[in-house]
Image (cartoon, helix red, strand yellow):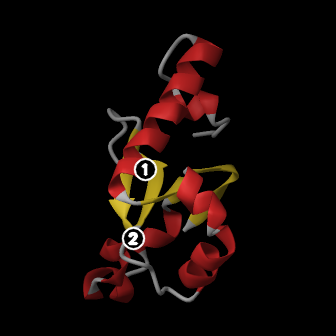
Amino acid sequence: MIFYKKLYYGEEARKNKAKIFSKIKRNSFSSDTYLITLASNPENLLDIISANVFNQPHFKKQKNHEDILVVGIAKGEAESYELVRQIIDEMYKKQGDFNIREFLEIKG
């Protein structure tokens, strides 16, 4: 996984940032952690992925998750939705459009 340089955090995730990163580095994801990522489908803006997905054997065997760009971390499903809303609101207020790559200053 690649982490966005200006990572967004939900309120609860911010309180537990060190613990969350410690678990992520050990590939020991907690059940209530959600990762906000750049969408895998270019037609969409962002994906919300439960960290539980990365505990599945399929992901543990494959390296395809190494190129996932994480732009936000949330604790709980509701907080993940709120965080996505905040990111999109901020993007629209700043740019007046929904070009997430431009907003995050991502090339390609």
Residue 30 visible in the current orientation: yes
Distance of label 2 from label 1 (alpha carbons): 14 Å
Q: In the figure, 25 relative to 39: above or below? A: below
- Look at the numbered disc 2 and give the secondary structure of its residue: helix
Labels 2 and 1: the sequence-earlier one:
2
- Expressed as whole percent of the image width and height from the top left, the position of residue 40 reads 36, 49
Q: Amino acid at mark 1?
A: Glu
Q: Position of residue 59 (x, y in %)?
A: 34, 80
Residue at the spot 32% in from the left edge and 32% down from the top edge: 43
x and y percent of residue 71 in the render?
56, 50
- What residue is disc 1 on? 79
* For discs 2 and 1, the disc positioned in front in the rendered view: 1
Task: Answer few, some or many: residues within 10 Å of disc 1's Cα (few below 14, many 20 plus, some between 14 and 19).
Answer: some
* Classed neighbour count for the residue bearing mark 2: other residues with Cα under 10 Å, few (<14), some (14–19), many (≥20): many
Q: Are marks 2 and 1 in contact (CB under 8 Å)?
A: no
> How far across and how far down the image is residue 39, in percent?
39, 45
Left or right of 73 on screen, residue 3: right
Quadrant of the image occupied by residue 108: top right
Instruction: Report the amino acid beneath label 2.
Output: Ala
Q: Is residue 101 above or below residue 77?
A: above
Q: Nearer the viewer, residue 60 or 108?
A: 60
